[in-house]
Amino acid sequence: MTEIRTLKLKNKLGMHARAAANFVKVAQQFKAGIYIEHNGQTADGRSILDILTLACPMGGMLTIKAKGADASEAIEELEKLVENKFGET
């Protein structure tokens, strides 16, 4: 099963190191393969360095793809994380 969701980054610093670390922490809880796309570039959702190379700022659009048995659950949790601004104010 493959799930795809496009989300807008709402936190002030965009996808910076702490946000990327939080994303990876959630992504690693699932067996599904998780990938993020921004402006035509794709990154492994379990690699902080890959995610940081996307340089996605506040207001940037991220497409999250999850493929595997628990893809739906993974997408739901990652969407919550992004929508909650990675726990930032």
Image (cartoon, helix red, strand yellow):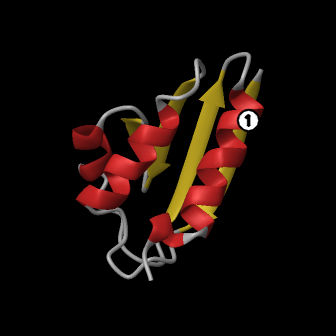
- Is residue 8 shown left or right of residue 19? right
Numbered label tally: 1
In the image, is residue 15 above or below residue 10? above
Q: Position of residue 78 (x, y in %)?
A: 59, 48
Q: Can residue 41 be seen?
A: no
Q: Which residue is drawn at 72% across and 46% down?
A: 76
Q: Which residue is drawn at 51% across and 71% down?
A: 85
Say which quadrant the C terminus sits in.
Answer: bottom left
Q: Can residue 27 be seen?
A: yes
Residue 84 location, quadrant: bottom right
Dot 1: within a 10 Å radius of its alpha carbon, few (fewer than 14), some, or many (20 or more) residues?
A: some
Q: Which residue is drawn at 24% across and 57% down?
A: 17
Q: Where is residue 64 in the image (x, y as percent from the top left)?
A: 58, 45
Q: Mark 1 points at which residue?
A: 73
In the image, is residue 49 above or below residue 88? above
| Circle 1 SS class | helix
Name the residue type under label 1: Glu
Q: Where is residue 33 in the image (x, y as percent from the top left)?
A: 54, 22
- Is residue 79 shown left or right of residue 73? left
- Is residue 73 shown left or right of residue 24? right
Say which quadrant the N terminus sits in.
Answer: top right
**In front: 77, or 63?**
77
